[in-house]
Image (cartoon, coloured by chain):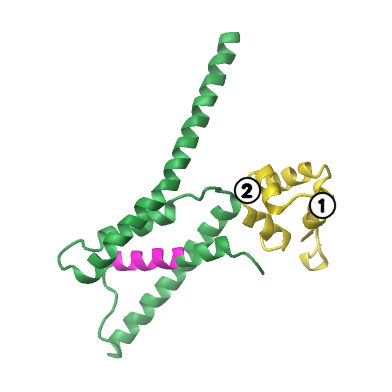
Chain colours: A yellow, B green
Amino acid sequence: MINTIRVERARHNLTQAQLAEKVGVSRQTINSIEIGKFIPSTMLALKLARVFSISVDELFSLEEKDGL
Amino acid sequence: MNSLLTFTEKESSMKTSLNKLAHRGFIYQKYLGLFLIAIGLPMFFFASGRNTDFPLMIGLFTVFTSMEKIEDERSVSLKTSSMYIAFVFAYTIKLVLTNLYQVSLIPFHMTEINHFIILVFVLAISVYYPRLYFSRR
């Protein structure tokens, strides 16, 4: 799964720590999601999408290797 | 109706305050655990008698079950998987030690359940904290 969190963060001029505070997780969690090491729950994905005012689909998308 | 709403609001705010208090307690639990480990380590290695492994075992348990300042889904997931990894490794170590002891390659083996539990928690903590704080690829 790939995501555009880093891009959206840059667009909204937010640091990882600021985004983490907004959605109520740790900075390391945001970093792990950005590098694709941790896949967030639906709830966290919705919160992240809401912060950037976009849909979850725009923020997260499946890759070829995900098999669908 | 109004009084019912006010009661519900009060109850909800009380629950939130209790949750905050409990969360703070779980954070400070780590310091208690570290204190018990500091006492338990010399006792475990140097003291003789029964139950000398208890402070270390309880200390490790207390540290492992304590909460982080920001406890989120990733930390919970890492804690669970770290415990799983630790249990598998500890059991492997126990089996290897027992086999080596049976063929007289080493003079000791793990017989105490408390020692096994200590090993599991040591491994779980060693796996959990690096994974929690060093998440770079």
Residue A62 image position (x, y, % from top left): 80, 60
User: Which quarter of the rendered picture does the C terminus of chain A lie within?
Assistant: bottom right
Quadrant assignment, res A24:
top right
Q: Is residue B35 magenta?
A: no
Quadrant assignment, res B114:
bottom left
Quick check: B77 left or right of A8?
left
Q: Residues within 10 Å of mark 2 (few under 14, many from 20)?
A: many
Q: Is residue A56 above or below residue B50?
A: above
Residue A22 image position (x, y, % from top left): 69, 43
Find the magenta span and give its range: B113-125
Q: Is residue A20 above or below residue B120?
A: above
Q: Is residue A23 above or below residue B37?
A: above
Q: Earlier in the sequence, mark 1 or mark 2?
A: 1
Which of the chains bears the disc numbered 2?
A
Amino acid on which disc 1 is placed: Glu
What residue appears at the point 33 percent right and 68 percent down from the top-left corner? B116
What residue appears at the point 56 percent right and 48 percent down from the top-left corner? B70
What residue appears at the point 56 percent right and 14 percent down from the top-left corner? B6
Quick check: B77 left or right of B52?
right
- Provide the residue designation for mark 1: A8
Residue A13 image position (x, y, % from top left): 80, 49
Which of the chains bears the disc numbered 1?
A
Amino acid on which disc 2 is placed: Val
Give the label on residue B103, or none. none
Q: Is residue B121 magenta?
A: yes
Quick check: B53 left or right of B131?
left
- Badges 1 and 2, same chain: yes
Residue B50 image position (x, y, % from top left): 16, 63
- Provide the residue designation for mark 2: A25
Question: Element at badge 1?
Answer: helix
B54 and B40: which one is in front? B40
